[in-house]
Amino acid sequence: MKVEQAMHRGVTWCSPDTPLWKVAQLLRDHDVGAIPVGENDRLIGMVTDRDIVCRGLAEGGDMREMTAQDVMTEGIEYCYADEHIQEAVAHLERMKIRRMPVVDGAKRMVGMLSMGDIAHAVNDSTCHDYAAAVSAHH
């Protein structure tokens, strides 16, 4: 199975200067745990709900003044839509991450591959190994 068969399409993303309160609204409105951050038509980072809490609120940040860039994780990991799902799962396991953007051959974002997508696409053993890997203490 290819990643494009398991991923979800229509991913919302934001710019680095998007106010953090707006990013939180996007997470809520789209019922997702992460929003990719893009600039000049390329991915530059990711903001998760955990980033907002741990890098924003817990550090005493003011949600009215902070932006996506203030809390995002840089050096974004991604996979290709035509990649085999097992390769993408192995990548996620190595990096201990729960989701990553999916790009096409021109490196344009075409979707997102999440833990939930994987749970529906692979066998129970692979799913168990992946969940154990990303849930292990870093």
Image (cartoon, grey):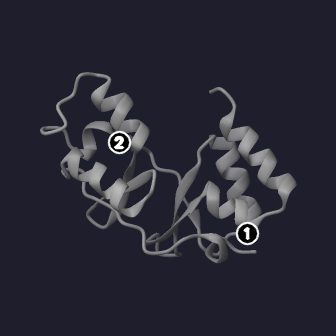
Quadrant location of the C terminus?
A: top right
**Residue sitting at 84 percent across and 62 percent down?**
123
Quadrant hosting residue 85: bottom right
Q: Position of residue 100 (x, y in %)?
A: 53, 56
Residue found 31% across the figure and 58% down from its top? 26
Q: Residue at x 43, y 72 (%)?
A: 108
Image point (26%, 37%), residue name: 70
Q: Amino acid at mark 1?
A: His
Between 53 and 108, the one lying in front of the other is 53
Neighbourhood count class around disc 2 (C-alpha, 10 Å): few under 14, some 14–19, many 20 upward: many
If you read the primary sequence from the N terminus, does the residue marked by circle 2 or circle 1 appear first? 2
Residue 132 image point, x, y percent:
75, 39
Query: Dividing the picture into quarters, in which one does residue 116 lie?
Result: bottom right
Image position of 126 (left or right of 67): right
Q: Residue extending furthest top?
A: 59
> What residue type is disc 2 on?
Met
Query: What residue would you read off at disc 1?
Result: 84
29 vs 46: above or below = below
Circle 2/circle 1 CB separation < 8 Å: no
Q: Is residue 37 visible?
A: no
In the figure, is residue 66 to the left or right of 71? left
- Element at label 1: loop
User: Is 62 on the left-hand or right-hand side of 131?
Assistant: left
Name the residue that disc number 2 marks.
72
Q: Residues within 10 Å of mark 1 (few under 14, many from 20)?
A: some
Q: How many marks?
A: 2
Q: Residue 135 in the image: state x and y as whole percent.
A: 67, 36
